[in-house]
Image (cartoon, grey):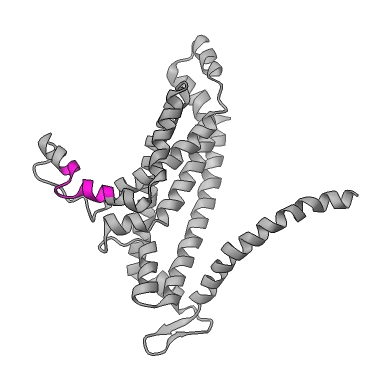
Amino acid sequence: MAGKRVLLPYGLSLPAAAVLTVFMTAPLVMVLLLSFNSFTMATGIQPGFKLANYIEVLGDSYFHTIFGRTFLLALWVTGISILIGAPEAYVIHRMRPPWRSIFLLVILGPLLVSVIVRTLGWAVLLGRGGMVNTVLVKLGVLERPMEFMYSFTGMTVALVHVLVPFMVLSVWTSLRRLDPAVEAAGLSLGASQWTVLRRIVLPQAVPGILAGSLIVFTLAASAFATPAIVGGRRLKVAAMAAYDEFLNSQNWPLGAAIVVVLLVAMVAIVMIYNRLVERRFKQVFQ
């Protein structure tokens, strides 16, 4: 009887494990195997087990630039999302119904629209004749329209708009465990507002900040549509490079190698970040 109870959770998880294996693990394994094949324009894809694609990706300065730009963009977007999303989540946490529900709906609203539609909207706003340049010129901030499109700044702005709701939701979910009476008690006992924020609110928000930053970083590093539309061909990221190899050059093995390197790098960065940052915050708040 005890043995059946031990095996019951595993039996209940078998359908989900099977679906995960078929629809996620199997494609990744196929991409991994494809990355070891070779390719020439004359013969096409040739089966085999060669490291030539990985040597090219890891040894070519062209790919170094692409991966450096990809992770720099992801870090920049993550940092800005934390600066915007964490305070916004705290403000929403302090709101009372029905304003809290209204502002949550405002934040979730963009997620209901296709990412391509949102990015095209930013392409219109950031153009030389767009609203952003027009307002900045009329206010005297700029003497002439600035080229936001096909720039690192434009990609950052568009990606932050797309991804900051994930940060807000993650931090707000963590703050829901915080009782406002605890903050009031700290203030009544003579603590300053800054001390209450640092010693009471921030420790509760840290798990949400960690989770949200991981989500934003991975989504930004693997983004394709937004960098392709706003950044264009001049500022390629890793996802665009893989797309070009698959569909333009028809070099599927090299494209698969780019995908594998991107995936491994993202997993390594996420694991190191999670361990180091979480340990650091534990030391600070203990």
23 vs 149, nearest the viewer: 23
The residue range painted magenta reads 121-133
Residue 168's spot in the image, x, y percent?
44, 36
Extreme residue toward the left, this view = 143
Q: Residue 59's spot in the image, x, y percent?
A: 39, 72
Q: Residue furthest bottom?
A: 42
Q: Which is the main secondary structure of the residues drawn in magenta?
A: helix
Instruction: Residue 115: say if magenta.
Output: no
**53 and 282: which one is in front?**
53
Q: Position of residue 241 (x, y in %)?
A: 36, 67
* Residue depicted at 32% across the width and 51% down the height: 117
Whole-percent x and y of residue 105?
A: 42, 34
260 versus 223 height, above or below: below
Left or right, 249 with reference to 232: right
Q: Is residue 7 visible?
A: yes
Q: Residue at x 26, y 60 (%)?
A: 232
Residue 39 position by quadrant? bottom left
The one of 257 and 115 positioned closer to us in this rendering: 115
Q: Is residue 153 visible?
A: no
Above or below 83: residue 186: above
Q: Is residue 141 above or below residue 26?
A: above
Residue at 42%, 24% in the rendered image:
99
Q: Residue 26 sits in which quadrant?
A: bottom right
Numbered circles on residues, count: 0
User: As drawn, is 111 to the left or to the right of 133?
Assistant: right
Quarter of the image where the C terminus is located: top right
Q: Which residue appears at 66% of the width and 56% of the height? A: 16
